[in-house]
Amino acid sequence: MNRFLHKIVAATVISGVSLTSCESYLDVNDNPNYPIEADISTLLPSACASTIAVLGYNGVLIGTMWLQFTTQGNTTNQYNTLCNYSLSTSSYTSFWRNAYVNTLPDLKDIITTSESEEMWDYWVIAKVLTAYNYHILTDLYEDIPFTEALDNENYPQQNYDDSRTVVYPGIIDMLDEAIDRISDAEANPSTGIDEYDMFLEGDMDSWRKFAKNLKLKVMMRDFDTYSSEISSLLSEDDFLEEDCAFTDFEDATNKGNPLYEYNIRQLNTQENIRACHTLLEYLLNYNDPRIVNLYETTTASGGDTSLSYGELYEGLPCGTKPSSSTVIALSESSRYLQSYDDPVYLMNQAEIYFLEAEAYARLGNTSMAKTKYDAGVEAAFDRWESTAGQGAAFISAGGVYEFDSSSEEAMLKCILTQKWVSYAHANCLDGVFDRNRTGIPAISSAFTVRVSNYPGERTLSSGYELGTLVAPGSTVLQPTEYPRRLLVPNISSDYNTNAPTTKALEEPMWWQVAQGE
């Protein structure tokens, strides 16, 4: 398959999987473990594309709104329930459907076929992507079908495995198996693997490193248990410190970035996703030039580049519909900047640096924590050509993002606050997991951010600290509570008597800090 056809296949799969707005493209009474009559060179592009299909649509949508980079436009209602955390067992079920019906069965077939034919590069990639998909599922739902997930004989009554004792250790085992097979894969590369691998072009050295990235990420869920293993992994210094992303998008209907396709091309309005005060005010306060890559200038400003950022950009309160007397006109608020070719990341470069920095900070290695933190901030600026190289001034001595090594708490706040910012226009669903794992950014008791005398001087609401999240104006949760999971979908619980009792949206998982911490 040539590169052009490769892109078409991928984009077709992405649009077909992720952009069915009613999420009814699958019959829950059909056995997902259907026979697949396709060779692995066809299945691998499909598995790559379906891995990022829902991540690039619902994952980005949830991440960008729950991290308060964006909010629902004040004249439309498309994402109101998401902004205000009003979710049910039928909300965002495509994560579950796509993984268990499309991606994981395809990856299982690749593993089976490649093992019998000793095509170990395919096997390694499929193992790592299987681990990645289970990681997303267990981070979203906690206990999930794992050991019996693709077992035909037990369908649809698969057991749900315990997240802490079975699923996470199982994911780590998968990654170790993949790492151990790298030498076999390198010894006999498969023809065309660089065309069919849509993330790392069949480079086994990169896949080994990415497997270690993911292993570190998973072990950080239980730092105390894995601290010695984490220390050993860091000492190997063998991580993929670059983006791992899907970038094969085209400027054509159903061939672009999944969220762009739905939110820009398919909806009858482009006014749904607007800048949220929470991140916008943070960037404005520090005169952070990355703002130009995240938001459009307001229509009211006319895009006059002689104006200050504060005169060019404006946000909306998180999840709050302004009253009729204080409505911010569309011309006075900024859209979230979207493009057909926005990458969809499995992990971004800044994220792995910040993950290493956090691990070093928790292990008490202040020097390496600073080194990796600085690299993470610079990578987050370097993501865009317009801000490349500008991060150095922000982290220099006296810079507004200078590393604070005064205590472990101070280091973690620095690292995770800048990591939060870096998730904007990247794999922001991971930022939701990080927030719930660490409690950073904290949830402020202040309800909103106030802007006075637009487009002039801006004033924070009383008691609000920049870089903290706020309670959405119409949240169904308590003011300082935050969503901790997606609810086990009814497409499973209605048919599987082994499904666990549905837990409350705000109930922390075993690896998450308690509410308010």
Image (tube, rainbow, N blue to C red):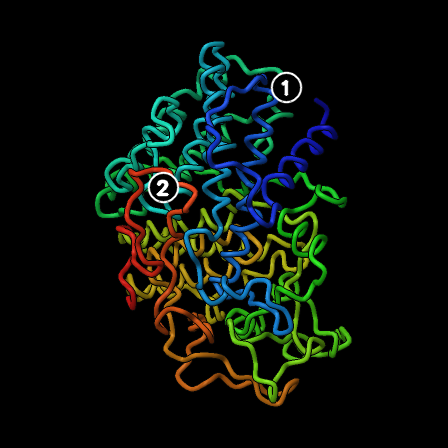
Residue 313 picture quarter: bottom right
- The residue at which mark 1 appears reads as 192
- The residue at which mark 2 appears reads as 216
Nearer-the-camera pick, 60 or 84 = 84
- Residue 82: x and y in percent read 50, 61
Q: Is residue 76 left or right of residue 185?
A: right
Crowd tier of the residue under label 1, counting other residues whose Cα lies within 10 Å: few below 14, some 14–19, many 20 or above: few
Seen in the picture, residue 184 relative to 222 is either above or below; the reply is above
Q: Is residue 454 visible?
A: yes
Q: Amino acid at mark 1?
A: Gly
Residue 337 picture quarter: bottom right
Residue most toward the top? 117
- Residue 407: x and y in percent read 28, 64
Is disc 1 placed on a helix, strand or loop?
loop
Crowd tier of the residue under label 2, counting other residues whose Cα lies within 10 Å: few below 14, some 14–19, many 20 or above: many
**Quarter occupied by the C terminus:** bottom left
Who's the residue at 55% across and 60% down the image? 391
Who's the residue at 61% across and 70% down the image? 73
Q: Is residue 473 left or right of residue 4?
A: left
Q: Earlier in the sequence, mark 2 or mark 1?
A: 1
Who's the residue at 48% across and 44% down the image? 95
Nearer-the-camera pick, 67 or 263 = 263
- Residue 381: x and y in percent read 57, 57
Q: How many marks?
A: 2
Q: Is residue 179 visible?
A: no
Give how far apart the Cα atoms at labels 2 and 1 are: 30 Å
Q: Is residue 96 left or right of residue 286?
A: left
**Quarter occupied by the N terminus:** top right
- Residue 90: x and y in percent read 46, 51
Q: Amino acid at mark 2?
A: Leu
Is disc 2 placed on a helix, strand or loop?
helix
